[in-house]
Amino acid sequence: MSWLGWQGLRLAAVPSVRHTCRRSAFSIELSHRTLATSTPLAFARPSKSLFYPRWINPKNGPDGKPIVEEVEEESATLEEDKPSDATKPPSESSSDSQAPAAPPDSSDSSDAPPSPPSSSSGSKSTPAGSIAKQSVPEVYPQVLALPIARRPLFPGFYKAVVIRNPQVVAAIKDMMKRGQPYLGAFLLKDENTDSDVITDINSVHPVGVFAQITSVFTASSSGKDGEDKEDGLTAVLYPHRRIKITELIKAGGKAKVESNTEDDRQTVEPPAPQQAVEGPVQTAFLHSHDVSVVHVENLVTKPYNKDDQYIRAFMSEIVSVFKDIAQLNPLFRDQITNFSINQVASNVFDEPDKLADFAAAVSSGEVGELQDVLESLVVDDRLRKALLVLKKELINAQLQSKLSRDVDSKIAKRQREYYLMEQLKGIKKELGMESDGKDKLIEKFKERARELKMPEVVRKVFDEELNKLAGLEPAASEASVTRNYLEWITQIPWGTHTPENFSLPNAQRILDADHYGLTDIKSRILEFLAVGKLRGSVQGKIICLVGPPGVGKTSIGKSIAGALGRRFFRFSVGGLTDVAEIKGHRRTYVGALPGKIIQALKRVGTENPLVLIDEVDKIGRGINGDPASALLEMLDPEQNNSFLDHYMDLPVDLSRVLFVCTANNLDTIPAPLLDRMEVLEVSGYVSEEKAVIAERYLAPQAREASGLGSADVILEREAVDVLIKYYCRESGVRNLKKHIDKIYRKAALKVVQELGEETFPEPEVATAASTASQSTEAPTESTETSIPPSETSSPESVSNGESIPDLETSSETSESASPTPPTSPADTTPNPSEDNPKTVTTQQRKPLPIPDSVHVRITPETLKDYVGPPVYQKDRMYSVPPPPGVSTGLGYLGNGSGAVMPIEAMSMPGKGGLQLTGKLGEVIRESAQIGLSWVKSHAFELGITTSAGDQFLNERDVHVHMPEGSIGKEGPSAGTAILTAFVSLFTKTKINPDIAMTGEISLVGQVLPVGGLKEKILAAHRAGIKTIIAPAANRADIEENVPESVKTGIRFVYVETVREVLDEVFRGEPIMERWKDTLS
């Protein structure tokens, strides 16, 4: 249901003053076409008999004459004596001596709402539908109840409604004919329900208004035959006072009520109620219509002191908010002006109740909040609720203004830029200076080239390309290619380098600070720097760091760059299959770019950086060429002084670049590429080194990363040893770092869970608090006012010097007549999580301090709670002598760790075949074949057969298995262990489990050297092996590279032949007595 302003009504009643509609947006809702189909009903001037204490106008006066003649005569007299009455509200009485006194709030302003048109003095009959003008009764116990949708009415402010129910329309017309144009307007509780009658008293709010029907218009619509038919009634209501339903006397049927306008705001002309004439209630005629009739009682505002400081403070704040809204919304400015003009009181502070009603009437607030204002009978409570609604209006107006300003500024900025650019083009065209920026671009390239020491051949190409660009149109595709090419030429650091630092103490300090252990690697690096110090350059050296994952190969490259003072650049070639990534693309291709090394020079800005080529052993090969072959030119010291990139097509000197490559395995690196590199093997760390690294580097880093830097959280050394032994046996420390990080994260979780949110509270959202403070903060100073003071108003009406009380405190202490509790201003603050679910901020969270009472110790006993059960349950499968056919070998796993691997052999009836299981590789299978062949050929010497010519294993099969079948096993180092297992099986002799062996065997029984001894010996030390049989060729490697702490408690036996292996393994066994004679 919509609202009609009184300006719109004037447009219908007095067409000659249409220009006044511009002052109010409400008048727009009454379109010209709607008025053309409306038929205003004329109202006759009341006779003296109408002011008698009676409710139904008699057809004849007291003297028996028709009342219409008296009305016409009196109307003529009133028109002559009171010409200004036409501008007064329709409820005003004339200046006749028998009429009640004029209301105190009437106004002579031309902007006041017009009175209904009266009949002329010469007329002898009254038009149908007219009513006589009468005073407003103060006691009207029974009224027609009209439900109102969307928003309630407030005393003193007009509202127009469209009534569709024929019964209600007939009843209203009957009421107007009888001179009783009064009804009760009550707000529907359900906003989605429209009705003209009340069927249930609980469907409407009990508190409404007693309203007078000032004007009615018949709303028409075109029928099927083109004829106008009546489609309801538009009634303009003027509420006089608050009333409350006490009883639903008669319930009506159901019908539909439609709004007449889209805007629900009420107009602001507030005529005052007239003096009522007491008399009996006579509404029996309403029972003949199917309408709702209710019994009501008046609600009177409770007495108040207008000089109360809280009331005056609320009023000052409302006036101040009105000023702010008026500056943003012209519609409010008009409403406030009309209200100020029609105030008869000299000061707006004399009528706080009317000010509260006015604030609620012109605000587009929530229905429930407006109804709370209507139901409030305590003035300060009503003012508080009205201020709440008005504050919301101010927030909406500010937001609309901000959005409007933002859009206007963007549009204005674009228009200004376009206008200035067009002017600039015109000026340059007139002066002959028209340019598209190409001259500036060419000058930029020349400026860059002057700062570089380009070789002569490069300078020549640069000049040619620059001249080509000068002659090309900017829109040409060739111009874009040439410009990009010149960008790359001028960004390569020709002749620019960083000074190098070959100080050995500085390099030693940096290497020791970044890495623990790795003595051989550090020594090799220092040798490399010493040569560079003497020669003045380290050109011609390509270093390749080889080792298992996680041993620090990449970080060593960074340390070398730091020691030399060079800039560092890293790129990986793992899985690279395109030669263009190394050599670049041809310039003719769309999106062509130089290769990685040219991009590296551009990034670092010097021609002598340290370039780390990672994962060089995993480089691929595809249909686009062989990148490994492309690396040959880049890494060859004899060729890279004139490296030719496909994109640049210019010789680039890479001889001053120090290349460092990393790999896990040398076997997959092409031989020509490996030949150009100096290999430094990073074998890994032993347990003692890993423990020190964890204590010095990994644990402090993990503690800081977990937010426990200042807390007393300690990972004990014994727990680190258990972690290394049963969880992290790899040669590197990457997996150890993951487990330590997990331990400290788990510790942080336990600290937060145990102490709770009381110790570690979440910080409050600053944005929500600031928004709330801004929305509830009242302005205290203003230089402009949109409420012009009336002629009789005092300066206090626009004063802002009154103190403003705390609204929340006032709302708690005040009484409320409404069943709905008052809403605090904080409830009106927009919720950031609702308006913008993804709230963002630029503020960084600060770490929370941890109390000194927190003490956490991670011990070997509690380690399982942090990292779970051990990964490695035991190191040895056989702790007691195993059955014949089982030996112990030492292997090197792919993750860089060693392992103790038992080898089991078994014989069974068959056809002389050999079966191998345990996910064995091709090399191990060959070692097994060699071992079995050697045993067959020496079966008589070993005592397996009785004569040299006896057949052996023709009718028996041999099965060899290596446990942990899910782990792949490869390599030649299991030869001696497999052969020993065959001899043990066929001679039925047990092998001591404390003996482990490694070594490759040849077909004639020679023991050959193997690799990975450091890791293998570390695994044997962990498993408690007491004797290790190793090839004699590996003696120097074991004595030099294996730490003494690992070799402690282990006896090393170095052998050259298989016979020496058998002598050591079966020492003290009975079979050895025969071997003395047969095995020489």
Image (cartoon, rainbow, N blue to C red):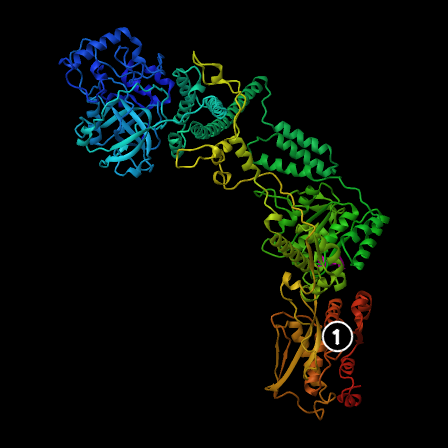
Is residue 164 shown left or right of residue 876? left
Residue 547 showing in the rendered view: yes
Q: Is residue 596 above or below residue 800?
A: below
* Quarter of the view holding residue 844: top right
Q: Secondary structure at mark 1?
A: loop
* Quarter of the view holding residue 743: bottom right
Q: Position of residue 426 (x, y in %)?
A: 54, 19
Q: Position of residue 163 (x, y in %)?
A: 25, 29
Q: Is residue 115 above or below residue 937?
A: above
Residue at the disc numbered 1? 1025
Q: Is residue 969 above or below residue 239?
A: below
Name which residue lies at 17% across and 15% down: 126
Q: Position of residue 252 (x, y in %)?
A: 22, 35
Nearest to the observer: residue 763 or residue 476: 763
What quarter of the picture does the N terminus occupy? top left
- Write the start and end of the magenta stretch as one range: 672-680
Name which residue lies at 78% across and 79% down: 1057
Residue 1011 showing in the rendered view: no
Is residue 695 shown left or right of residue 772? right
Q: Residue furthest right?
A: 534
* Dot 1 amino acid type: Ile
Is residue 1076 shown left or right of residue 358? right
